[in-house]
Amino acid sequence: MPPGPDAHYRRKTADLAYLAGIIDGEGCVTLSKQRRRPLGHVACLVVCMTHEPVIRHLQAQFGGRIRHRIKANPAHKPQWEWRITGRKAVELLFEAAPWIRVKEMQVSVLCEWANTVIENTAPCKLGVPVEIMVRRSDLIDQIHTLNRRGAYDASRP
């Protein structure tokens, strides 16, 4: 039986739900410093694992780049890293957000940060207003706190 008119929507929904599970289990949602701009950050979604076919599938479905990482210790398996950055990462996380559970707070902070960037894209002779810079800095600190290794402690700065 040929696929119905909703087949593309169902496939996309299933791909986004699958991606959300991969992000929750193996992903990192963060804001990375940009080398070219000392005060600039970029939205970044990274998935790292030893199973290459999953990484290839993510790139085929959603774009991004792949990097093969060989460990110095020969007892460790080589890793494959899929990375998508910038506006594409924000849009993809926004689409997958309904299914993300473990990294829900990181996605929320990253989307709020992205809104401060999008709202302030108009050219301005004075640059970015101080209150927006302060808010961005707070959001960057929040996402880095959420991504710290070890047990999460809400009282820890």
Image (cartoon, helix red, strand yellow):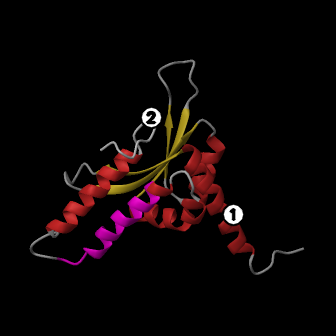
* Range of residues picked out in magenta: 106-123
Secondary structure, mark 1, is: helix
Quarter occupied by residue 11 = bottom right
Categorize mark 2 by other alpha carbons within 10 Å: few (<14), some (14-19), many (20+): few
Which image quadrant: the C terminus?
A: top left
117 in magenta:
yes
Q: Amino acid at mark 2?
A: Gly
**Residue name at image x 69 percent, y 63 percent:** 14
Residue 27, horizontal then vertical, whole percent: 52, 47
Dot 2 falls on a residue whose secondary structure is: loop
Q: Residue at x 54, y 34 (%)?
A: 79
Dominant secondary structure, magenta: helix
Tell which tag, 1 or 2, sits nearer the viewer: 2
Question: Which residue is labeled 1 in the image?
Answer: 14
Residue 120, position in %: x, y?
Answer: 25, 74
Q: Residue at x 57, y 55 (%)?
A: 101
In the figure, 49 relative to 14: above or below?
Answer: above
Indicate which disc residue 150 carries.
2
Give neighbour class at mark 1: few <14, some 14-19, many 20+ (Cα, 10 Å).
few
Is residue 63 shown in magenta? no
The tag on residue 139 is: none
